[in-house]
Image (tube, grey):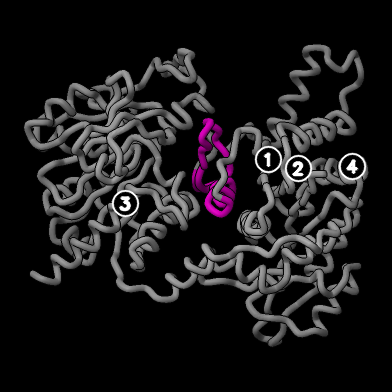
Amino acid sequence: MTKYIFITGGVVSSLGKGMASASIGALLKARGYKVRMRKMDPYLNLDPGTMSPYQHGEVFVTEDGAETDLDLGHYERFIGNFCHKTDSISGGRIYYNVLKKERRGDYLGATVQAIPHVTDEIKDFIKSDLTDEDFVLYEIGGTVGDIEGTLFLEAIRQYANQIGKENCLFLHLTLLPYIPTAGELKTKPTQHSVKQLQETGIQPQILLCRSQMMISDNERQKIALFCNIAPEDVIIALDADSIYKIPLQYHNEGLDERILHYFHMENAPEPDLTRWEKIVSVIGNWKGHVKIAVVGKYCSLLEAYKSLGEAIYHGGIFHKTKVDIKWIESDSLETMSKKELDETFSDIHGILVPGGFGNRGIEGKIIAEQYARENKIPFFGICLGMQTAVIESARHLLGIKDANSTEFSENCTPIVALMTEWVKNGEIQTRNKNTDVGGTMRLGAYPCKLKEGSLAAKLYETNDTIYERHRHRYEVSKKIVEQLETHGMIMSGVSPDGLLPEIVELKNHPFFIAVQFHPEFKSRAFDPHPLFKGFIDAAIKHQKKIIRE
């Protein structure tokens, strides 16, 4: 029978429940089990697609086109499996489903209430779309005590009673704060958090305690005594200098063994942690070092570029090269002199311009792209980064001074414009400027035909069709890219009908490639994305060129 693990968090937010969940899933998969990862977020948005990156961080897009919490990115990177639309739900979606059922009359005239109707809807999600999984892990967003999470806790309490507590494990992530003036770790916040969870009717079986340092046996026994669990089930989660060390740390602490012990699965196969050991070995023995500038709109909150930062790191792991990222707010470039720009990029071996929405900082992105093009610095543009790269080339190579996107200006020569119709899974999708902004973009995996002999084909090591994930409303003009062919720009990737540019590159440049999709979503530490491998390789070569000169 499928075993269920529910992961909650207490004391403070941003403790790393997503990373803890992903690491547990990785350890169970390393033992040969079939693992499924899911996220339940109590907030009232239908999904995070309309949230500001400053509010919620990155929006991670699944292969089947769901806009989800960034934790699903952790799941995919650590487990290696694709997540699906059905692996993420919010409180808003739960209430929306309940109200739709009420309008249809599905409740047969009953008074619709939090219990049982809302909790039943949550339980329906928990058991939906499952097949033959050995373990399903559910991360509950937020912190125990948040009012919007109350019904989710009640639902998982009910679910454990219904299918048998022997089939459900509650794991609670807490913090052991260190007080420097007292010179000691404090266990009281963890005790209070567990007590608050117990008040909902949930007794955690395992505590995962974030800490800056290892605790003594006396402290472990104290936590166990007051939290009503065995000392062996108090697992210390030490801070790590790399997230890719966490699965091995948890294993060394015995976390996966205690999980299997709870489910009476002591005869489970030993885990094969070879891939994690290899990654940790590379991280501890870098052969080189390069520096990449990321010129973005949300650099003051790095969670907004979580998958991007990891994908760059993966490219470095492949080349055994440590990559330092210099995060540059794009609008800061707009008032810089030539001398200041030279100083800003003086120690940079590659420039990456990522995606984003809105007019702020657009001119700064264009300045960075012009600098990379003219100074032959390896360049990689993603989504909006491709659109602004084409706008830059149209302005400065074709002389179209008012070249722009209709997203930013209605009085311009439209190099980029709103896509009003496209095909998804055989169905025509239509949009206009008055369409709701939530969930109305080109989302998820779409095919892209590569041009034989191009840099893109070389990096992907194929001339066939590839599939990459999209999240955008606006498309680059094919006509403009064709005009830029006389200046060395080519479309090295197009939609199957040949109408939409998916990849552009410059032939007269050491490495200049820009893509309409988001390759960072499919990169893994043990399977880096080919575009990021190529970009870091180009940065390494550029560094060597600078040294020779």
For the magenta stretch, what is the residue range? 53-79
Judging from the image, what secondary structure is the residue with disc 1 in?
A: loop
Packing grade of label 1 (10 A; few <14, some 14-19, many >=20) is: some
In magenta segment, residue 424: no
Mark 4 and mark 3: Cα distance apart in space: 50 Å
Judging from the image, what secondary structure is the residue with disc 2 in?
A: helix
Q: Is residue 124 above or below residue 69?
A: above
Mark 1 touches mark 2? (CB < 8 Å): yes
In magenta segment, residue 59: yes
Q: Of circles 2 and 4, which is in front?
A: 4
Q: Nearer the viewer, residue 90 or 166?
A: 166
Residue under pointer 1? 43
Q: Position of residue 157 (x, y in %)?
A: 87, 46
Q: Give whichever of discs 4 and 3 has the lower sequence position.
A: 4
Residue 148 circle label: 2
Residue under pointer 3? 295
Q: Give whichever of discs 3 and 1 has the lower sequence position.
A: 1
Residue 363 circle label: none
Mark 3 touches mark 2? (CB < 8 Å): no
